[in-house]
């Protein structure tokens, strides 16, 4: 059946392109990695897009990231898989900023924990699952450290697709449960995310599932790109001075960098870019190591460990794209310790009433270290990405017992 005119979403996709060689691939076909085993990027007719849409049009639209549909690859509206996405808020850390003596600068948290499934993985997976639906795929599989699997399971079930998920056996219990409750078939593996990825890759032929691993299909980047579009719009099309991003597979870093290029190409922003800072944990810092060594690719990190599970990624296929964004922006890569992450999480919660996830807290540690060593200044407007709700992560047990049969000691509470 031909789609009706009304169900056509205006879209400007022209083709796909290998991020390494630039080789072109046809749109509207199922794609994984390029011939040389690298991520593919979606390309658009940006002149036509810029002519069809204005900043003023955006101001009249409500809702979350689907409001950027012209920048996205889904052709038919009925393939959009939607779970009530919202535009995530920008929350200034004003109390902390004043204590740190900021002079004109700002620390702003972009709180991605408000998205469906409680993390920004919703952005990438909503796009990947919608495109899988458009391309007629029925069974999805992926390796995950937790949040991506949860988002895939939710959107896949919403679309009526099967979802099979492999996670390291020490993945937070809450993630394993949410995946299973949302209808995902979840397996715990005695290894790391790259070991899980191998199982997905090797099982493709036997099972017929489609591999939705980070950057191994082209559309999760497009979803994460909306973080950059949304940030620009929320700041009045004026990008901040610095962005601190907790970097695992790097989809968000690569996606935001692509968003800024597309916005400049259509004339909505100028050439000014934020310095992009890749934040990792000292127990798993392949991108930081490669950045410091001046290398184009990162080596596999052995014995990866950190409390910030979302950034425990020992090897990333898009390593060179992350490093390129960091270097072209004049940014840097920085590793922080687990101890500092957990202290920072308590510090922000107690001073600002904002409960970060460990990965989000890592960006605040990186910010403080960079402010102390002069890599950022008290004048800089800095955005920290809190990528998931703090409620998904273990918290210290608090016990203040009251015996209801005894008089209450109100003096101690006043
Ligand atoms: C996945 C994840 C990250 C890393 O995101 P990438 O874009 O893959 O680098 C950071 N924090 C949390 C909470 C995550 O779930």
Image: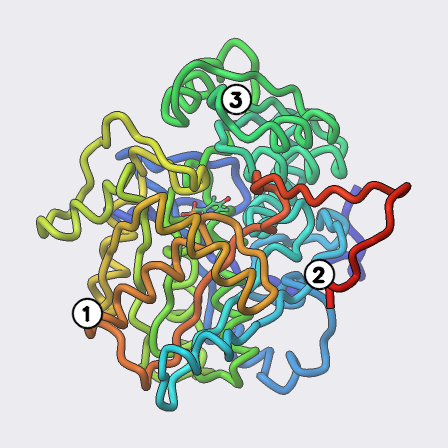
Locate residue 65, reporting x and y percent.
Answer: 63, 62
Q: How many numbered badges does the structure rendering display?
A: 3
Q: In the picture provided, is 401 more to the left or to the right than 166?
A: right
User: Which of marks 1 and 2 precedes in the sequence?
Assistant: 1
Whole-number angstrom distance, CA of label 2 to CA of label 3: 50 Å
Q: Residue at x 68, y 32 (%)?
A: 178
Whole-number angstrom distance, CA of label 2 to CA of label 1: 42 Å
Locate residue 295, reporting x and y percent.
Answer: 11, 47
Q: Residue at x 28, y 60 (%)?
A: 325
Instruction: Answer few, some or many: residues within 10 Å of disc 3's Cα (few below 14, many 20 plus, some between 14 and 19).
Output: many
Q: In the picture provided, is 115 more to the left or to the right than 103?
A: right
Q: Which mark is residue 373?
A: 1
Q: Residue at x 39, y 18 (%)?
A: 191
Locate residue 23, reporting x and y percent.
Answer: 29, 46
Of residues 342 and 402, the one nearer the viewer is 402
SS category of the residue bearing label 3: strand
Q: Which mark is residue 166?
A: 3
Of residues 47 and 144, the one nearer the viewer is 144
Instruction: Answer few, some or many: residues within 10 Å of disc 2's Cα (few below 14, many 20 plus, some between 14 and 19).
Output: few
- Of badges 2 and 3, the one in the foreground is 2
- Asked if the residue at label 2 sits under 8 Å from ligand 1, the reply is no
Q: In the picture provided, is 2 more to the left or to the right than 276?
A: right
Locate residue 176, reporting x and y percent.
Answer: 62, 27
Question: Which of the image's four quarters has the C terminus?
Answer: bottom right
Whole-number angstrom distance, CA of label 1 to CA of label 3: 40 Å
SS category of the residue bearing label 2: helix
Disc 2 and disc 3 in contact, CB within 8 angstroms:
no
User: Which of marks 3 and 2 precedes in the sequence?
Assistant: 3
Instruction: Answer few, some or many: residues within 10 Å of disc 1's Cα (few below 14, many 20 plus, some between 14 and 19).
Output: few
Which residue matches tag 2?
A: 412
């Amino acid at each position: 059946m031909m789609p009706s005119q009304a169900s056509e979403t205006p879209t400007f996709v022209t083709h796909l392109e290998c991020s390494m060689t630039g080789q072109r691939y046809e749109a509207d076909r199922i794609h994984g990695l390029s011939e040389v085993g690298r991520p593919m990027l979606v390309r658009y007719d940006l002149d036509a897009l810029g002519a069809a849409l204005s900043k003023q049009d955006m101001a009249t639209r409500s809702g979350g990231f689907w409001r950027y549909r012209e920048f996205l690859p889904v052709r038919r509206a009925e393939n959009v898989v939607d779970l009530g996405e919202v535009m995530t808020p920008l929350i200034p850390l004003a109390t902390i900023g004043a204590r740190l003596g900021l002079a004109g600068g700002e620390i702003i948290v972009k709180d991605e924990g408000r998205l469906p499934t409680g993390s920004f993985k919703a952005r990438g997976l909503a796009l990947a699952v919608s495109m899988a639906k458009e391309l007629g795929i029925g069974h999805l599989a992926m390796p995950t450290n937790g949040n991506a699997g949860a988002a895939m399971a939710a959107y896949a079930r919403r679309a009526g697709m099967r979802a099979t998920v492999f996670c390291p056996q020490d993945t937070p219990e809450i993630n394993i449960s949410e995946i299973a409750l949302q209808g995902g078939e979840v397996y715990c593996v005695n290894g790391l995310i790259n070991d899980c990825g191998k199982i997905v890759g090797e099982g493709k032929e036997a099972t017929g599932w489609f591999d939705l691993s980070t950057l191994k299909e082209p559309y999760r980047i497009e979803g994460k790109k909306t973080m950059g579009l949304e940030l620009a719009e929320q700041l009045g099309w004026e990008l901040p001075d610095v962005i601190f991003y907790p970097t695992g597979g790097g989809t968000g870093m690569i996606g935001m960098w692509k968003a800024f290029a597309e916005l400049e190409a259509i004339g909505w922003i100028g050439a000014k870019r934020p310095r992009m800072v890749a934040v990792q944990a000292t127990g798993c810092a392949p991108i930081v190591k490669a950045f410091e060594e001046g290398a184009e690719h990162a080596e596999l990190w052995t014995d990866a460990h950190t409390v910030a599970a979302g950034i425990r990624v020992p090897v990333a296929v898009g390593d060179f794209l992350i490093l390129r964004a960091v270097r072209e922006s004049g940014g840097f890569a920085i590793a922080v310790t687990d101890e500092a992450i957990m202290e920072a999480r308590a510090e922000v919660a107690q001073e600002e009433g904002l409960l970060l996830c460990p990965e989000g807290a890592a960006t605040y540690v990186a910010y403080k270290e960079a402010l102390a060593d002069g890599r950022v200044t008290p004048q800089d407007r800095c955005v920290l990405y809190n990528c998931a709700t703090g409620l998904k992560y273990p918290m210290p047990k608090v016990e203040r017992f009251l015996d209801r049969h005894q008089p209450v000691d109100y003096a101690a509470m006043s």
